[in-house]
Amino acid sequence: MKLRLGIPKGSLQDATVQLFARAGFNIYANGRSYFPGTDDPEVECMLIRAQEMARYVEHGVLDAGLTGRDWVIESGLDVETVADLIYAKQSRGKVRWVLAVPEDSPFRRAQDLDGRIIATELVSVTKNYFASRGINVTVEFSWGATEVKPPTLADAIVEVTETGSSLRASRLRIIETVLESNTELIANRSAWQEEWKRQKIQNIALMLCGAIAAQGRVGLMLNVQTRDLDAVLAVLPALKRPTVAALSDPEWVAVNTIIEESTAREVIPRLKAANAQGIVEYPLNKVVI
């Protein structure tokens, strides 16, 4: 038995393949094939645009797939959401669909766009956003290059952004956030009811979440005399509490913990000052909480 898994083709593809590699699954994709290989004999992969993933998962062509929460909502289709995977093509955060207008336009809020034209790829979500506020607009589907359409082809746009830099480069100003989104692992409802497939999907989700949780974190281990233990523990942040283990010498203990990598340069000197010895910083592949 094999699990048919959809990998998002396009802007998320490289970040997704890298995430799977950190999770222990090697996916071998090239520019000519829509069926990348994998080192897991129980998984068959297919490259599908994120915008279409929910359709093929709901229809059963795929047992599971990765796509944005935005495209699941936009599709209105019935799929099982297995896990939120907070990563994007450039960052480890969520993305936003924002309402943006030309910098020099008089528009300051959504209500100012009554009777105007809005260009976007996210048509259904955008229509619902304005309708829920009682604002009458014309929403037009954009095939791409949405940022260049105002003010000539549209009065405003609803576009996805991670940092807002591309919108600023196009001399656009964000006035509201329409939707926050992140990548999700979704599953077909029937496949989710099959014990083997559900377990396989859950295992993949566990490893992907573990790889995401490890990003930006490192492990620390050190030795310290018991008389200095409280001072060392006071320095250490941790997911819960650091692990403290006895050593062969009863006057010494070993301490193991996880910290944010960005804090290591400040934490390690403070540990040394608190009389910690044998301090080792090491990289993490996965953190399963």
Image (cartoon, rainbow, N blue to C red):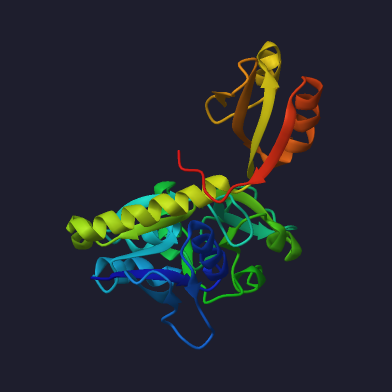
Q: Toward which corner of the image does residue 95 lie, by quadrant?
A: bottom right
* Foreground residue among 176 and 260: 260
**Most foreground residue, 33 or 145:** 33
- Please report the residue visible at 18 percent of the width from the left and 61 percent of the height from the top: 190
**Residue drawn where x is 64% and y is 68% of the image:** 147
Vertical relation: 22 (above or below) 59:
above
Q: Is residue 193 above or below residue 288?
A: below
| Image label count | 0
Q: Is residue 179 visible?
A: no
- Indicate whether 91 appears above or below 275: below
- Quarter of the image for the C terminus: give it: top left
Name which residue lies at 59% across and 51% down.
92
Point out residue 264 in the picture as x, y percentages from the top left corner.
73, 37
* Residue 188 in picture, x, y percent from top left: 26, 62
Name the residue furthest top.
227
Please identify the residue farthest to the bottom as the structure is shown. 32
Residue 97 image offset from top left, x and y in percent: 54, 56
Is residue 253 left or right of 55 when viewed as pictured?
right
Which quadrant holds residue 185?
Answer: bottom left
- Quarter of the image with the N terminus is bottom left
**Closer-to-camera residue (262/57):** 262
Q: Measuring from the top left, give residue 155's x and y in whole percent.
A: 60, 64
Q: Is residue 215 visible?
A: yes
